[in-house]
Image (tube, grey):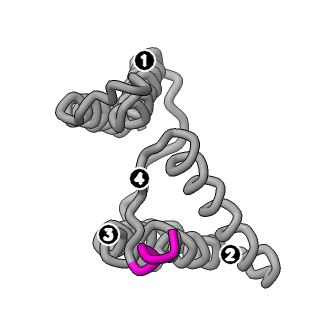
Amino acid sequence: MKVADIFGGAFGILIGAFAIWEGTKMPVDVVMKIGPSFFPNILGGLLIVFSAILIINALRGRSKGKVEPYRLSDKGTQRGLITLAAGIVFCIVLDPLGFIPTSIVFLTFMMWVMGKRSPLLIVVTPALITLAVWLVFEKVLSLSMPAGVLADYL
């Protein structure tokens, strides 16, 4: 497990550094001073910190568990691959369909994949989360989200 934790931590540091580097290419908002790179920079920084902690724990001998080979018959592997595919589809259809419908469908699907089957929960939760995120970004932070098919109504 030690080697896997070191490799995973190093990979996480690279991804975090890449997110911060890409964030520097985004324009600075002259009004709010936050800009669109604010959240990617925070997430990239946190990923670097937690990845470094993972590496430190591995080097100190505090790694737990053992690495098993991936098996497609494993439910966790299947959920991981489905989540990856759903995330790719989400990114592809986000701009043409818009944030609100895409996010509601994505969150509903992901709740179903993760085993949530309560009809009330699976219908209400994605809509409320999507609305809350949209309101924060669109109205509070004044950062436009892709409107897509709802462009005439938003």
**CA separation in Å, label 3 and label 2:** 28 Å
- Label 4 or label 1, whichever lies nearer to me, is 4
Observer-nearest residue: 15 or 73? 15
Is most of the magenta stretch helix, strand or loop?
A: loop
- Label 3 or label 2, whichever lies nearer to me, is 3
Looking at the rendered image, the quarter that the N terminus falls into is: top left
- Label 3 or label 4, whichever lies nearer to me, is 4
Q: Earlier in the sequence, mark 3 or mark 2?
A: 3
**Residue contact at pointers 4 and 1, CB within 8 angstroms:** no
Reading the image, the residue beneath label 2 is 115
**CA separation in Å, label 3 and label 4:** 12 Å
Which range is magenta?
A: 149-154
State whether residue 32 is above or below residue 85.
above
Tell me which amino acid carries mark 3: Asp
The local crowd at label 2, few if under 14, some if 14 to 19, many if 20 or more residues have their Cα within 10 Å, is: few
Q: What's the residue at 43%, 26% (across, down)?
A: 32
Q: Which of marks 4 and 1 is nearer the N terminus?
A: 1
- Label 2 or label 1, whichever lies nearer to me, is 2
**CA separation in Å, label 2 and label 1:** 34 Å
Reading the image, the residue beneath label 3 is 95
**CA separation in Å, label 4 and label 2:** 32 Å
**CA separation in Å, label 4 and label 1:** 39 Å
- Label 1 or label 3, whichever lies nearer to me, is 3
Q: Which of marks 1 and 3 is nearer the N terminus?
A: 1
